[in-house]
Image (cartoon, helix red, strand yellow):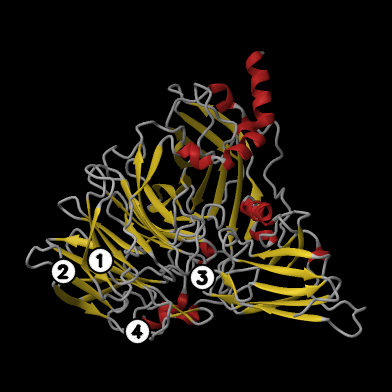
Amino acid sequence: MKSKIFLILLLLYTPLLTVYAQSDIADKESEYYKISTIPIPEDVVLEVGGLALMPDKQLAVATRRGEIWLVNDPYMKNSSQPKFSRYAYGLHEPLGLAYRNGSLYTTQRAELTKITDTNNDNKGDQFETIYSWPLSGNYHEYSYGPLFTPEGDMLVTLNLAWVGYGASLAKWRGWLIKISEDGKVEPIATGLRSPAGFGFDKEGEIFYAENQGDWIGSGRITHLEKGDFAGNPAGLRWTTEENSPLKLKAEHIPDSVGLMHEFAKSVSSLKVPTVWFPHTIMGISTSAILTDTTGGKFGPFEGQMLVGDQGHSKIMRVYLEKVNGEYQGACFPFREGFSSGILRMAYGSDGSLFVGMTSRGWASTGKEMYGLQRLSWTGKTPFEIKTMKAMSNGFELEFTQAIDRTTAEALASYSMTSFNYSYHRKYGSPIIQQQECPIASAEVSDDGKTVRLYVDGLREGYIHQLKAEGIRSKNGQPLLHSVGYYTLNNIPEGDRSVPTLADHQMHKDTKKQVNSCGWDESKRITEMPSDWKSGADIVINIGTSPGLKFSVTDFEVPAGAKVQLTFTNNDDMLHNLVVTKPGTVEEVSDASMQMGLEGSQRAYIPKSDNILYHTCILQPETSESIYFTAPKEGEYTYVCTFPGHSKVMRGVMKVTPSNTASR
């Protein structure tokens, strides 16, 4: 009886515990994975573009400023101030770095370069072009890599240009290519938009990370093989080339095709994402991919992937498995709280993880413009969902510690929701076709480490959100991270039946599909009110500037004035504009970060009385006008509440007395 009372109280207070956990999660994570900062000399601008470990335990760091630095004693075992020495300079924005056989290799904007120190003075003095490619001059033509294959070839990815949408203006833009040491090029796969991160899994298979954009509903990683098309049609421009491994044409891809998984059944070369990272929930800009090959030096997740996120300054964890010959799996939160936007990661010789960061032009939740930190396992094992395996009628969860059987068998400890994204030309996608998947039964293994969940309403091709907030370990601990997202590309063969649902209706769409701009229509008036006979008193035009900024950071209006505010999104990502009551912008911003699956359906406008007026979320190269009567005197902060933008993308509307106001 006591255990039942405890369970009822536990489930009753779980929402409160969840809110509390969200506020101090970085502190909780630090008990298991410690972040230490490597001091950077004041005269070194270390906007990290690439990391490579050298044989003598030096760390090589490439920067977006075109330099390569060698860091001696990056583990800080002999000194609290590692020594930095410049190895090379004058490069063109290198965004990758690799070491092999005495030389460093880096990918500049227009070429793959080999740099060698021929006289052993820790300075590169021999620069060789392995291969060069044309540029159109577009600012968005980033180039990444190289990543060495076991055979000694190099993999490079080429970003699309941006002209209001992704475009392949120069040959092989939007492709993964393989380059040999003697400069021979082999195109491998296309459909890439912004492939900043790519790496191998434990089997040596190549995966790349993608960011939300046109044709890309949300961040994701995708397994790439020769001849694959990953979804963005711009790179298909080059499939007429003689050495192209596929012949698919852009005109074969309609502007809107519904679900990518369904469309792939009729397009054999289309490769669906291996794992989706729900946008703004798990991150907003996936970056580095790295597999834990440390042999246990980095904790209990040997063989699993770590994926960085630049905008949210955090690392996520991925468990992969093969079902029906295809990779799929689940992503989980892992570690947040880094000082800047994560772009690169590299394991050190001691099994710790070097994390290289930059935020210039790509603002992040980490406040610093750049940084170099090291993540180390403390030796303590966190209570986590270690693996999430697909079954024919549910999932099997393996935990890092033995679980409390009472909470693990209680169906109220779990919830599951499936959802998807649209595959279309537009930038990003709201969450669509959201549906509850009731948990019918939970069976705990004899060793108390595994739970078999029988789930009603599994849907192939959908993302399945698992929440396990009620689970406790055998010693009473809650999960460090109680949520995971499994991309169910294939349901395994076997019995599809589930036990009779006693407390749930059979699967149905229990959540009304919502795609609206906020909650209160009166806060977004997009047509001039009919009683404004002489029009607006004041017209304000605000656009965007590079680096997640509004083009107008402050303006004045008189109290009671009729205001027409036009917001134009001339950036290459999604934005909105939200006017908040004085002193409430942090509360509104934090609320937008906690909207979960509802965020994209409500244009990232949280339900709050502290919001006065707002636009909808705007696609790139679009605009919207809103109309309102200026409130009483004061300073009203306006902000973009798209998660990850709100800390830097702000301005102030100053409302002055009506007799002293000026535009």
Please report whichever mark, 3 or 4, sits nearer to the chain's N-terminal start.
Answer: 4
Q: Which residue is mark 2?
A: 124
Distance from disc 1 to disc 2, alpha carbons, whole Å, reads 9 Å
* 530 horizontally vs 355: left or right: right
Distance from disc 4 to disc 1, alpha carbons, whole Å, reads 23 Å
Q: Is residue 605 above or below residue 12?
A: below
Q: Residue 28: which numbered mark, if any?
A: none
The amino acid on which the numbered mark 4 sits, given as a three-letter code, is Leu
Could one spot residue 495 in this view of the protein?
no
Question: Badge 2, how many Cα within 10 Å: few under 14, some, many 20+?
Answer: many
Mark 3, mark 4: which one is toward the viewer? 3
Q: Residue 135: which numbered mark, if any?
A: 4
Q: Provide residue 350's location: percent of width, then percent of height.
A: 24, 42
Q: Are marks 1 and 2 in contact (CB under 8 Å)?
A: yes
Mark 4, mark 1: which one is toward the viewer? 1
Please report whichever mark, 1 or 2, sits nearer to the chain's N-terminal start.
Answer: 1
Q: Which residue is mark 1?
A: 68
The amino acid on which the numbered mark 3 sits, given as a three-letter code, is Gly
Q: Are marks 4 and 1 in contact (CB under 8 Å)?
A: no
| Quarter of the picture holding the N terminus | top right
Q: Is residue 4 above or below residue 102?
A: above
Distance from disc 4 to disc 2, alpha carbons, whole Å, reads 26 Å
Q: Provide residue 232's location: percent of width, then percent of height.
A: 47, 72
Q: Is residue 336 above or below residue 619?
A: above
| Quarter of the picture holding the C terminus | bottom right
Q: Quadrant of residue 552?
A: bottom right
Q: Which residue is mark 3?
A: 547
Please report whichever mark, 3 or 2, sits nearer to the chain's N-terminal start.
Answer: 2
